[in-house]
Image (cartoon, rainbow, N blue to C red):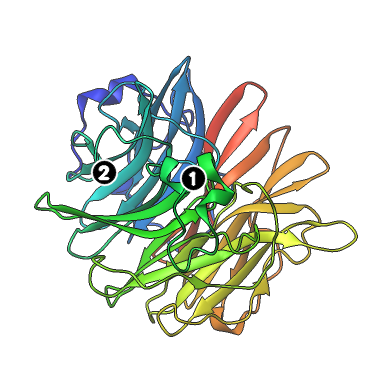
Amino acid sequence: MLRRPRRFVLFAIATVLAACAREAPPPDPRTPAESPVVLAVAGAANTNVSLAAHGQDVVATWAATAGEATNIVAAISHDGGVTFHAPVRVNDVEGDARVTGEQAPRVAIGRDIVVIWTSKLGGESHVRLARSTDGGATYQPAITLHALHLTGARGWASIATDAAGVVHAAWLDGRDTMAGMTHAATPGSGESHAMHGAMRQDIFEATWRPDGSRSEVRLAENVCFCCKTSISIAPSGAIYAAWRNIYPTDIRDMAVAASTDGGRTFTPPVRVSQDHWQIDACPEDGPSTVVTSDGVLHIVWPTLLEGPNPKKAIFYCWSTDGGRTFAPRVRVDVGDEGEASHPQIAAHGSGVVVVWESAHDGRHAVDAREIPAARAGVVTPGRLSSPSGDGQDVYPAIADANGAAVIAWTRKAGDVTTIRILRR
């Protein structure tokens, strides 16, 4: 039974939820909702939501900013995203979070709930992590995933947990920025560090075990420096990390590295697709991955679609051989007239569902497509969620709750920002 912690009195949900929801018959996972649930911390800007699901349990985590202080909060649903308990604060240090569009808090749920975010107090960037062992009622004091007092920026983290409760996290890290002025890149990273100098970011993966022991490995050097990362775990225990890499010269394509020994070592990065997006800047738009029950790795990402009117588009492909090779890419946002960005992917039945942000004529909407027979690359047309009123819908997230696609996003309407969650 979920315990009701004292800190519940600090927060409020913008939508009144039925107190008897957990006593009612469980909802049919195939039944879509007609309108979204609205979650918010009163008096705060609520932004940058992430989702995770395990069975009928769905956890939403996001940033709540009031004045100069940003906290990370999380709310849990036990009925597949139909209703949610009031949010609780995750970070134990008041106002320590630093959140931007692609640098959102991330959450994983399995035996426990684990939330990761970037903290920046006293001028130092830290990747922080907190665990809940009581179903999201309370969170233990946070730990820092790396050594303290490191120089440089870090964040853009991703997280996954395995069946044993082992946590795997990936993030970008600028601790060796100055070394990048003189040292050559590790094989596989694509170019010399000197090309970016003070902007250098490497990608790290850390493993945190329930007994408190931790380990860390550098996956690649001098990667694209402010795109989100993604990490996924296969039923076999294989771990996949994905990021936007830099290839000669200033080409920023997707890369994946795999581990089959619990995160102790990873393969050299494999280029997912030859997109040839050449840009001397960070697109601030990274990949998303998921591994389905058959062990297939699926990845979506944005890249530049060239032509008379170049714009970003969303592409998808998969690997059936442990990330060694990838199928040819398939465009997902066909029929979307806007510029597509910030994709997320989740397993859904025998296929996957992809969500993204679509910008068209000054309006930002959340769009989604189902790929029911994933490896066939057949994309189902039709929007699963759309804007309403005068608001802007940005930075979507998605999770699968026993066959229901649960989609979340940030709604901006005037000076008010809330979190919207919809079952489809």
**On the rendered image, what quadrant is the N terminus found in?**
top left
Query: Is residue 415 visible in the rendered structure shown here?
Result: yes
**Quadrant in which the C terminus appears:** bottom right
- Count up the numbered dots: 2
Measuring from the top left, give residue 19's x and y in whole percent: 34, 36
Q: Nearer the viewer, residue 45 or 261?
A: 261
Picture coordinates of residue 116, whole percent (x, y): 34, 43
Q: Residue 94 is drawn in which quadrant?
A: top left
Q: Residue furthest front?
A: 182
Secondary structure found at label 2: loop
Which residue corresponds to the image point at 50% horizontal and 82% vertical from the top-left? 325
The circle drawn on residue 27 is: none
Dot 2 crowding, Cα within 10 Å, few <14, some 14–19, many 20+ = some
Left or right of residue 354: residue 217: left
**Looking at this rendering, what residue extends furthest in the left direction?**
211
Q: Which residue is mark 1?
A: 181
Chain-order first, disc 1 or disc 2: 2
Three-letter code for the amino acid on which mark 2 is drawn: His
Circle 1 SS class: helix
Q: Which residue is mark 2?
A: 146
What's the residue at 48%, 14% (across, down)?
A: 67
Q: Give the quadrant of residue 166.
A: bottom left
Q: Is residue 349 above or below residue 91?
A: below
Q: Which residue is drawn at the image coordinates 13% and 53% (left, top)?
A: 210
